[in-house]
């Protein structure tokens, strides 16, 4: 889980390069990465590990600011 959060913290903006980096690092398509990330940010452990990042992602989700998988 912390690996997902560390990665997301480094790649705050979405680009085609981020999709390539997801495939290379996690060996999953970007859509699956987003599913895993969504699940991770709902945990207490994630909030304790990266509170600012998790709160930002939760605000984006609540506002309907879905990140796109490509």
Image (tube, helix red, strand yellow):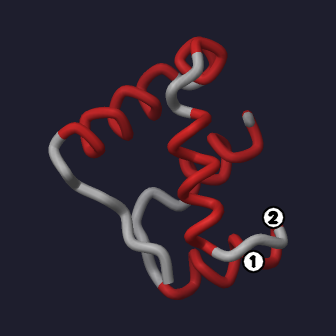
- State yes or no: discs 2 and 1 in contact (Cβ < 8 Å): yes
**In the rendered view, does 24 fall on the left or right side of 59?**
right
Within the image, what quadrant is residue 66 found in? Answer: bottom left
Q: State the image quarter where residue 10 is shown.
A: bottom right
Picture coordinates of residue 2 (x, y %)? 73, 34
SS for callout 2: helix
Seen in the picture, residue 2 relative to 18 is either above or below; the reply is: above
Q: Dot 1 corresponds to which residue?
A: 23
* Residue 48 to residue 8: above or below: above
In which image quadrant can residue 49 be found? top right
Count neighbours of disc 1 (C-alpha within 10 A) and say few if under 14, some if 14 to 19, many if 20 or more: some
Indicate the secondary structure of the residue bearing disc 1: helix
Quarter in which the N terminus is drawn: top right
Q: Position of residue 27 (x, y in %)?
A: 83, 72
The residue that disc 2 covers is 26
Q: Residue at x 57, y 38 (%)?
A: 39
């Amino acid at each position: 889980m912390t690996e997902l959060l560390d990665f997301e913290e480094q790649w705050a903006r979405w680009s085609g390069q981020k999709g390539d980096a997801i495939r290379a690092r996690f060996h999953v398509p970007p859509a699956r990465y987003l599913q895993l990330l969504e699940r991770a940010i709902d945990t207490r452990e994630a909030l304790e590990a990266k509170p600012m990042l998790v709160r930002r992602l939760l605000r984006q989700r609540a506002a309907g600011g879905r990140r796109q998988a490509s």
